Amino acid sequence: MHNSADSAFRQTLLEQLPAEVLRDAESRYREEPRGRWQGKVGVLAAPRSTQEVAHLVRLAADARVPILPYGGGTGLVGGQVMPEGPAPLMISLERMNSIRAVYPQENVLICDAGAILADVQQAAADAGRLFPLSLAAQGSARIGGNLATNAGGTGVLRYGNARDLCLGLEAVLPDGQIWHGLKRLRKDNSGYDLRHLLIGSEGTLGIITAAALKLSPQPAHMGTAVLVVSSPQAALSLLALARAQLGELVSAFELISGQGLAFLRETLPDVRQPFDTAPAWSVLIEVGLVHGLDPQKSLETLFAAAMQAGLVEDGIVAQSHQQAAEFWSVREHIPQANKRIGSISSHDISLPLGVLPEFIERGDKLVQALGDFRINCFGHVGDGNLHYNVFPAKGRSVADHANQRMEVQRVVHDLVHAFGGSVSAEHGVGRLKVDDLERYGDPAKLAAMRAIKAALDPLGIMNPGAVLKTVPSAVQQT
Amino acid sequence: MHNSADSAFRQTLLEQLPAEVLRDAESRYREEPRGRWQGKVGVLAAPRSTQEVAHLVRLAADARVPILPYGGGTGLVGGQVMPEGPAPLMISLERMNSIRAVYPQENVLICDAGAILADVQQAAADAGRLFPLSLAAQGSARIGGNLATNAGGTGVLRYGNARDLCLGLEAVLPDGQIWHGLKRLRKDNSGYDLRHLLIGSEGTLGIITAAALKLSPQPAHMGTAVLVVSSPQAALSLLALARAQLGELVSAFELISGQGLAFLRETLPDVRQPFDTAPAWSVLIEVGLVHGLDPQKSLETLFAAAMQAGLVEDGIVAQSHQQAAEFWSVREHIPQANKRIGSISSHDISLPLGVLPEFIERGDKLVQALGDFRINCFGHVGDGNLHYNVFPAKGRSVADHANQRMEVQRVVHDLVHAFGGSVSAEHGVGRLKVDDLERYGDPAKLAAMRAIKAALDPLGIMNPGAVLKTVPSAVQQT
């Protein structure tokens, strides 16, 4: 059905494109951060222009060679590795990494899809603006990948997901046509929203080559605090209180569990923690205020009101940038601590805020019933996104529970689904959650997705095996 | 190809559904607010449940009868009237108008698609929250129509378009399947974003039956001012200054032209105007502040800084709710004044902010070159959306220029397109702008739209003739 990007295909490319477009497929292009898969790469191309991307796509379509779009390679669900089937043409956007233009007056930035997220943030800052997408991999993740996977992170509560930060796209569609959609408009109702269809489609409907991004005013003052809450429910009540006082100016609201702090103390003792005794639950809150408001005073007012309401038991409002950075360091090192402990199963889930505390309570019981596990439940609680990760008891290893991974995952995901949540919150579906999508996805939506995939990519060459399991019928018939 | 919803089809419906689902198609269902079209209605159904909607769609599909979804009938581009072809089955959502649930803690509201926008706003306010979609027709527009057309209005600068306020949808797809997608989640990357595809598709890909809407915290204090600016460029510099001082707390930023104020004085002299002599350009600015900020003080600070920067010549900060309401009344009566004067051609356009002043200058010259016209250019300048409307000279009538309408429109739309703008900003494409979409739309995007339409609606029964001209090939072949 599909053919490998073999030496004959490589020869075809070399006849039509400059030799420097092709690169050696070093081993790093076959790997992904969690080490679950080893991918195949037939030919690696690193085009320098949208026209070259389009040319490559047309040649792959002619030869029925699958295409694997590649950004920074930081995805956590295997969307960027193709372990099965014919070896693909990998199209890496790494050389298309320019900031094309910044329009401070418009709060717009246009860049190539291969621009590193941190470089986009910096270009915005240089223009006195904020590009608020913020996530752990920002030093190597590329904006095209962030958009293809609709990345989340810590700024979603205030600024939305990656899709909410995108005004327009340029992309190469599966037939090699270039869609010129780099609009700098806030209102544009001219037909179906192809932008939002490509965003989050994980390279299965086309290759994003450039984006017009929405910038925000930089907050005048930042403030940070860590507050100890009695429970996840108290954390949510604290969030409501914070938003009643400060509205949209609450920038981040992260839940930290005692288990996470214990892992940190065990594996990364140099990371300075705010409390001598790790609280069972605490919240890292960040506010970004406008002129006329004092961040410390605002946070102290919130702290006092939360104490009075019985939501908060203890807390520290950062008195300096350094102290704020220390608080953030705690939050940011938790994934690393998790990695050192070694999880049996990790879950990137989201829930309606109202049911989140009950989910945590019931989830813990169900998981504990399966074995003597440690649970680190933390994350972006302000937007209902938890990283609910399950670890072996102290002294035991992941290997001791190798056969329980699927069982644990099934229990957690079933419960998420029962509560109206999503088992793919911010990381996407990739290859990791294709079965979950089949299991939990709405049948009418899945049917529509398959119809759209078959309509836009009738040859099925764009990142086959990601997101959707079923091969489009149009291809099966050929 | 398609069949009329005739008496035989009516009989089929009566055999399968309760008689009360069908209604008399009074003349108002055939009209649209601008009086350009008279539509046909074969059978009018007003289902009471999503299941009844699905049943109707299946019966129409079986009979190859076109379907015309109907909300509040307030659309300005003819998406809700079908003047040509077989008489359709009109499916009005008017009886599905419940607020299903409000979740204040989650900032979520779920309602039927037939809920009136003002009722949704009120239900949010009753729960101490804000549903920020705000537009002239809110007393009769229904939320399903707002979403199907991705409505805009005055709140877009701060809160986004209708699509940005929607977390999830329930919809009946063209094959009669119900998509259950009423998620209350802020992060959900489980497959293609069918929600954003249906939003803005103007009833051509399915019928929205319910929505999960995003609410916001209510601002603690509102402030309003009218400031006289020397030019549209000064207005934009004022916007930048306001956002530098108050960030996202600037809620509305509306441009008012001297021509608009003159029309108002001429046709609606009872509307009290803020200035004795109508300024050539003024801006209505509204801020919605958090606790700790004083709206009058904040606006006065802005006023003073803008005076000092030479952006503003005069101004009034509202000292009471009543005065603020008077300022808004001026802005809100301008469309009515326009109607009384009678426009030759009206244009709902958007532009990148940076080129907006030059567009106004060049547009005026080009239009004036065509004849002795009066131009009222006003609107949501904060998000780049202008209503650029052209009127006859005083003493002359629209009839005197009947043959110039298309010429004027062409000149304006060509210029918008040349500047990277959109000729369909907030009203949608409907039937009015189908040719514009063909002319100005990106070919790759249009091809993708046609492929998606054919894939999801192979019979072409969903609102045929709206948005897309071309009949899907699947239908042409039958």
Image: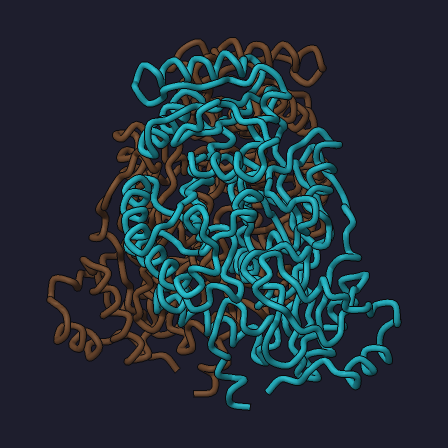
Chain colours: A brown, B cyan
Which residue is at the front of the view, A293 or B69?
A: B69
**Quarter-of-image position of residue A301:** top right
Question: Taking B338 as reference, is A244 left or right?
Answer: right
Q: Is residue A327 visible?
A: yes
Q: Residue furthest front?
A: B395
Say if B309 sits above or below A20 in the image.
Answer: above
The quarter of the picture where the C terminus of chain A appears is bottom left
Q: Is residue A39 visible?
A: no
Residue at image x 65%, y 67%? A443
Which residue is at the front of the view, B315 or A127?
A: B315
Say if B40 sits above or below A127 in the image.
Answer: below
Which residue is at the front of the view, B1 or A141?
A: B1
> x%, y% of residue A305?
65, 12
Say if A171 sits above or below A303 in the image.
Answer: below
> x%, y% of residue A346?
54, 45
The quarter of the picture where the N terminus of chain A appears is bottom left
**Quarter-of-image position of residue B4:** bottom right
Question: Taking B4 as reference, is A337 left or right?
Answer: left
> x%, y% of residue A459?
40, 78
Residue at image x 17%, y 64%? A22
Question: Taking B338 as reference, is A123 left or right?
Answer: left
> x%, y% of residue A38?
36, 60
- The number of numbered badges drawn on the structure is 0
Residue at image x 80%, y 57%? B95
